[in-house]
Amino acid sequence: MNYVLDTHSFLWTLFEDERLSPKVRETIKNPENEIYVSVITYWEISLKYSIGKLELHGITPKELPDQAKQVGIETLYLSEQQASTFHLLPKINHKDPFDRLIIWQSISTNIILITRR
């Protein structure tokens, strides 16, 4: 199966995996599963880090892609098609633009989203 981690799940996977449910930890560690992090997550983390809304555990956002690769997480890039069809995402109460774009990316690629919600 293919899974994409939302921003919280990604950071918890790297730094606080005890915050993940046992089922999610098992899913992430299963070598039969492909685990992704969206390039949008890197953008969100970098932005929040730059304005002081997010602290990382002794590293900078620039180091996150290497950290992800070390634990077997691949990057899911945003395609032009996904960006240009984002308007098709149904209106939902969730207003965070980063989360909404990751949700749309998950839907449009048919990849299961792992989130804390």
Image (spheres, grey):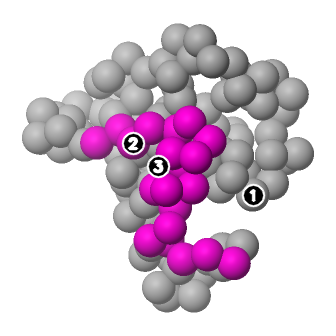
* Residue at horizontal 25 percent and vertical 43 percent from the top: 78
Is residue 64 one of those drawn in magenta?
yes
- Which label is found at residue 99? 3
Q: Position of residue 66 (x, y in %)?
A: 49, 56
Q: Secondary structure at mark 2?
A: strand
Q: Which residue is mark 2?
A: 75
* Residue bounds of the magenta highlight: 58-77
Q: Is residue 21 left or right of residue 7?
A: right
Q: Residue at x 71, y 26 (%)?
A: 29
Q: Is residue 70 left or right of residue 76?
A: right
Q: Looking at the picture, how far across and down is residue 52, in whole percent?
A: 57, 88
The residue under label 1 is 15
SS of the residue under disc 3:
helix
Q: Position of residue 98 (x, y in %)?
A: 41, 55
Instruction: Look at label 2 and name its amino acid.
Output: Thr
Crowding around mark 2 (Cα neighbors within 10 Å: few <14, some 14 to 19, many 20+) is some
Is 1 left, or right, of 38 in this rendering?
right
Looking at the image, is mark 1 or mark 2 earlier in the sequence?
A: 1
Q: Is residue 114 left or right of residue 16?
A: left
**Three-letter amino acid code at the position of disc 3:** Asp
Q: Is residue 6 visible?
A: no
Element assignment for label 1: helix
Q: Is residue 43 above or below residue 14?
A: below
Query: Answer yes or no: do the residues labelled 3 and 1 have beta carbons within 8 Å?
Result: no
Q: Is residue 20 visible?
A: yes
Other-residue count near label 1 (Cα within 10 Å), few / some / many at <14 / 14–19 / ≥20: few
Q: Which mark is first along the chain, 1 or 3?
A: 1
